[in-house]
Image: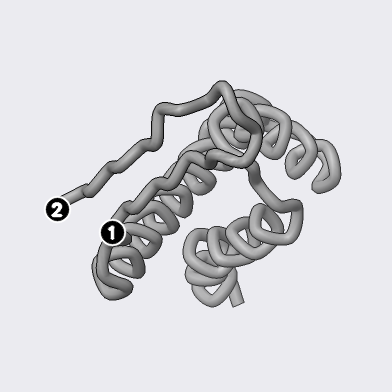
Amino acid sequence: MLSLLWICCFFWRPDNKCILQVQLPPSDEKKKVIDDVNKDRRFAIDAFLVRIMKSRKIMTHQNLVAECVEQLSRMFKVLHHSVLSHLCDLFDLLVQPFMLTIQ
């Protein structure tokens, strides 16, 4: 990736300006990076949910989501509804097959 940088170094007059010219990466590369980051975040959310559920055997739903958001906020900005959706996905993945065998 080629980056061009040109700076006007005359700062003693207010009408002189600093001009930066930077080439942006292609949009498809940017989309790939965003998809990879979202994929890593999805795994992190799932891992934190499972870790919390294993360490505390009995916990209310609200406390589970709140603790997961609190721990993940140290790593990245996490939205409340994304944790809820991942929790529902984990429930469907882990609990639903056992419920079908019990019935």
Q: Is residue 33 above or below residue 15?
A: below
52 with respect to 39 (left or right)? right
Q: Nearer the viewer, residue 100 or 92?
A: 92
Q: Going 53% across and 32% down the picture, which residue do you hit?
A: 51
List the residue tagged with mark 1: 23
Instruction: Assess disc 2: are there few (<14), some (14-19) or many (≥20) residues with their C-alpha within 10 Å of its C-alpha.
Output: few
- Mark 1 or mark 2, whichever is nearer to me: 1
In the rendered structure, which disc, 1 or 2, sits on the residue that comes first in sequence? Answer: 2
Mark 2 residue element: loop
Q: Which percent across, then down, holds residue 41?
A: 46, 48
Q: Residue at x 44, y 57 (%)?
A: 38
Q: x, y (%) of residue 5?
A: 28, 42
Q: Which residue is mark 2?
A: 1
Residue 2 place in picture, x, y as percent: 15, 52
Q: Looking at the picture, which amino acid does disc 1 mark?
A: Gln
Query: How many discs mark residues in the rendered view?
Result: 2
Q: How is the image coloured?
A: one colour
Residue at 52%, 65% in the rendered image: 98
Quadrant where the C terminus is found in the figure? bottom right
Give the numbered dot on residue 48.
none
Mark 1 crowdedness (10 Å alpha carbons): few <14, some 14-19, many ≥20: few
Name the element at disc 1: loop
Closer to the camera in the image, 72 or 66:
72
Q: Give the residue furthest to the left.
A: 1
The part of the image, by quadrant, that contains residue 16 is top right
Whether tag 1 and tag 2 are in contact, CB under 8 A, the answer is: yes
Q: Position of residue 101 (x, y in %)?
A: 50, 72
Amino acid bearing label 2: Met
Please indicate whether residue 19 sits to the left or right of residue 84 in the image.
left
